[in-house]
Amino acid sequence: MRKIWVKADPWNKDIVIAALESGADAVMVPKGMSSEVKKLGILTTVAPDGDLVLGSDVFTVEVRSSEDEKKILAIPHNKPVIIRTTDWTIIPLENLVAQRCNLFFEVQTREQALTASGILEKGVDGIIVSADNPAVVRSFITELKQQAATIPLVPAEVTRIMPLPLGDRVCVDTCTSMEQGQGMLIGNSSAGLFLVHAETTENPYVAPRPFRVNAGPVHAYVRVPGGTTRYLSELRAGDPALIVRHDGATEHAVIGRVKIERRPLVFIEAQVGEQPYTLILQNAETIRLTTPEGSPVSVVELREGSRVLLHTEKAGRHFGMKVDETIREA
């Protein structure tokens, strides 16, 4: 997930407050001011005497010519590098993003921020907001946090539905109230992830819980920020989550609670073309997939020929990361 830092050097208490209230990941402050930040709230400081120390934990490169690219690439890739420049045209942005990670770009305008976040689609790893106006800082952070990748979704035709015995299923309760058409991508294989709808629907049995996705058994994959997957059994409170809308738009959320309970299950198979994909969910009326129109459809209403949304990809995964190798999952 892209990090957002805010520059408050020279010291500016109002900028620090804006960073804290907007959900920034860290704030850059002068030497001796980290303790003042801690009085305002829990926020990582970047300073000569901060939580992250400039010159050892974090490095800064002032780019004046294309030759400075070599300096950036020479720094260990596990160390964040802050890139500063007055002329963005001299920076080989795409080259840098393609060749190393932990790149942080200092930006002063909205256009610079959007450019840095969109390079080669994945963007830089971090953006440092440098602005003197707290309102501008809040606006930048809000827009950057809302800007997430679009994930392509395709309609799939349900080909098989089969009740299963009891199993351990996972409810993911987020700190976000989701709307109709939103949920999480879940699947038995990372090659085919179903859009499992959030519990936003009124029904006679239980009140809506729009913060919740009843996601499936402990073995299932879930798409998370950063283009990776995790097992549902690995999720914990405080972890990042990825909310996906029926049109593919995404937003980041925080997991507030994970509940694992033993429940009856149902097996669902759906095809895209000739390729089948499968998913196991709790067998209950309140559990829903998502139609191509963005409507929730209960698993008890699914029939052969029903259409639901999937995200498909060809690459396999190793420890959640895409790998180019042949992997068969049944």
Image (cartoon, rainbow, N blue to C red):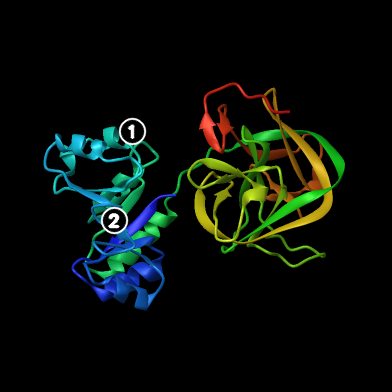
Residue 158: % across, % down: 75, 35
Relative to 19, residue 144 above or below: above
**What's the residue type where badge 1 is placed?**
Ala
Relative to 17, residue 184 above or below: above
Relative to 46, residue 246 above or below: above
In the rendered view, does 213 fall on the left or right side of 315?
A: right
Most distant residue in the left direction: 64
In the rendered view, does 68 fall on the left or right side of 78?
A: left
Q: Quadrant of residue 211?
A: bottom right
Q: Quadrant of residue 25?
A: bottom left
In space, the residues marked 1 and 2 are separated at their CA atoms by 20 Å
Q: Which mark is residue 53?
A: none
Report if the CB atoms under discs 1 and 2 are less than 8 Å apart: no
The residue at 64%/34% (across/down) is 192
Nearer to the camera, 61 or 48? 48
The residue at 20%/34% (across/down) is 70
In the rendered view, does 316 fall on the left or right side of 226?
A: right
Q: Which mark is residue 128?
A: 2
